[in-house]
Image (cartoon, rainbow, N blue to C red):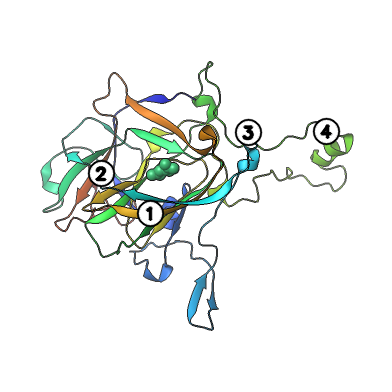
Amino acid sequence: MPTSMPCPSIRIPVEQLTPSSFAQFGTVIENPAHANRPPPNNDFVPKSVSANQGSALKYLDVTHIANLYNLAPSKKPAKAVMNMFVCAPRELRPHEPSNSMPSSWGDIDFDDDDESASVNAQRELFDVPILERHPFTTQTFIPMGLSPYEKHTQYLVIVAPTLPASASRRRTDRAPPYPTPHKPQRRSIKDVFARARPSPFTNESAPPPSQFSRLHPSQKPKGPGLPDLKNIRAFVADGSQAVTYGAGTWHAPMAVIGDRAIDFVVVQYANGVDMEDCQEILLKPDARAEEGVVVSVESDSSGKVLVKAGPGAAIKAKL
Ligand SMILES: NC(=O)NC(O)C(=O)O
């Protein structure tokens, strides 16, 4: 995999982090009873049972954790680890108009007259120079000590889908380590017949389940491709939400917006092999690009980041 990739200028509007808006990238952990969102709210609510002699409500399986290191080339086993990231607020630069293309997500109005910008809103820009992924593990960020009412400290979860491998690789590039299903070394005649469709034994016509088919969609590996920058997205989260990046999901290093650092407990697997634990790619604006990949961050007079695209967007995104 190259260590950098050329990128066009792209501006990304901010969306609200919800389980359904984030589903293709991972899971959002939150108390459904407090998730006070405007309709349509078709979010998945985990099953709950009574616990602790009736004094607690226990939501089951609130996130999906995956350990795919048994498919890593080194075969080095991983262990579950909890790290703490103390993430300082990021520097934003003043908003300026640009001819950047909007990310293909969101209802984006691209001309730049100030009239429809929110009253008293402050518009700033956050540059995204690097993305990373953990191909063999999910990674869960749990903020500690951050009240959801603390309007001037929030965090941005910036994620991109993965391009098909064929669109990502130059002939000279070696594929980075990523999870591939085990192939039996030598197949017996019985195996060959067992996988044939229609099955000579049962007449079954559906293909046999792959090794990944039992995994929750957010746990399934994403493949070896580069990030799909045209479809990169940015979600704003508050202290009532934790987030799990699905295994192999391209994401920006955590971006805190606001007044103070946020302490995150981070839960994942790791085996100590650098290229298997974390793969990074620098985004280098190409020759014609003005600025690269940039999140347009607009906040109200209290410092709360405004949602500008997707469900819950106050007005049309103004980049
Ligand atoms: N997401 C983030 O801030 N950092 C990482 O994923 C990491 O493992 O360094």
Query: Label 1, label 4: how many angstroms apart (C-alpha)?
Result: 47 Å
Point out which mark residue 264 bears. 1
Mark 3, Cα crowd under 10 Å, few <14 / some 14-19 / many 20+, is few
Foreground label between 1 and 4? 1
Tag 3 secondary structure: loop
Point out which mark residue 74 bears. 3
Q: Residue at x 47, y 38 (%)?
A: 133
The amino acid sitting under disc 3 is Ser
Relative to 175, residue 161 above or below: below
The amino acid sitting under disc 4 is Arg
* Marked residue nearer the N-terminal end (2 or 1): 2
Tag 2 secondary structure: loop
Residue bearing the label numbered 4: 187
Query: Label 2, label 1: how many angstroms apart (C-alpha)?
Result: 15 Å
Query: Label 3, label 2: how many angstroms apart (C-alpha)?
Result: 36 Å
Residue bearing the label numbered 2: 90
- Mark 1–mark 4 contact, CB under 8 Å? no
Query: x, y percentage for residue 25?
Result: 46, 47
Confirm or reject: label 1 Cβ below 8 Å from ligand 1: yes
- Mark 4–mark 3 contact, CB under 8 Å? no
Foreground label between 2 and 1? 1
Quarter of the image where ligand 1 sits: top left
